[in-house]
Image (spheres, rainbow, N blue to C red):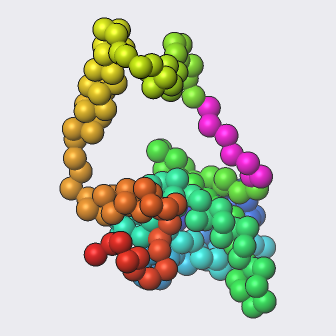
């Protein structure tokens, strides 16, 4: 989603005190990681300019998932400006599904809220089955159920070679963009 003056205006008015109607967004350009936008606005007669950066998840550089891009920006917020002469990052923004722009800055930790599920963890089944010398009919039924589930969730393939390369990086390491081309990726 490309940030627009309409989407960013309320954010900059509420969080920076931008004069209503003064927010102007212009595309700067794109590079190997993503795109940059200049956001200009007025605060009490003084012009202020900031950059909004968007990472591209389609380029296969370890930014494949939304969570990857969030992690990069949270790390940038924590580290930019620490080096002498380096620019400061002032906030980390997110766009909601409705297009609303909001800050996720300032978190020392992040949490996930999710639904409750009742039952046993499949790890319990794996531990129990793995500790047996012989499998009985119920063990084999549990294994078939797990295999069936895995086959179903892996049956849909995406036409995104970068994600398969990402899985290789995740299997071998962390998934972050390698510095240079790793020897195991050809």
Left or right of 72, for residue 175: left
Most distant residue in the front direction: 133
Residue 148 location (% of width, % of height): 26, 25
Residue 128 location (% of width, % of height): 49, 19
Which quarter of the rendered picture does the N terminus lie within? bottom left
Q: Is residue 3 above or below residue 79?
A: above
Residue 32 location (% of width, % of height): 41, 80
Magenta segment includes 108: yes
Which quarter of the rendered picture does the C terminus lie within? bottom left
**Which of 56 and 156 lies nearest the eye of the viewer?**
156
**Which of 48 and 46 lies nearest the eye of the viewer?**
48
Q: Residue at x 47, y 71 (%)?
A: 177
Residue 105 location (% of width, % of height): 71, 57
Name the main secondary structure of what is drawn in magenta: loop
Magenta segment includes 112: yes
Q: Quadrant of residue 116?
A: top right
Q: Which residues are magenta?
A: 107-113
Does the rendering let one see residue 53?
yes
Q: Is residue 58 above or below residue 103?
A: below
Q: Residue at x 65, y 62 (%)?
A: 74
Does the rendering let one see residue 26?
no
Number of marks in the rendered image: 0
């Amino acid at each position: 989603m490309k940030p627009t003056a309409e989407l960013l205006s309320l954010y900059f008015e509420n969080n920076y005190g931008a004069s209503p109607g003064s927010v102007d967004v212009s595309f700067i350009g794109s590079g190997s990681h993503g795109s940059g936008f200049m956001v200009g606005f007025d605060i009490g007669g003084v012009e202020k300019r900031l950059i909004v950066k968007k990472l591209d998840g389609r380029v296969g550089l370890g930014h494949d998932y939304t969570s990857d891009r969030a992690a990069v920006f949270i790390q940038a917020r924590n580290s930019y400006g620490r080096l002498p002469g380096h620019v400061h990052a002032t906030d980390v923004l997110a766009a909601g599904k409705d297009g609303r722009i909001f800050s996720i800055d300032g978190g020392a930790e992040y949490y996930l809220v999710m639904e409750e599920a009742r039952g046993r963890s499949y790890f319990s089944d794996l531990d129990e089955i793995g500790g047996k010398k012989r499998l009985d009919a119920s063990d084999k039924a549990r294994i078939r159920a797990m295999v069936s589930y895995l086959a179903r969730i892996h049956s849909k393939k995406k036409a995104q070679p970068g994600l398969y390369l990402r899985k290789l990086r995740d299997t071998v390491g962390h998934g972050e963009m390698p510095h240079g081309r790793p020897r195991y990726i050809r």
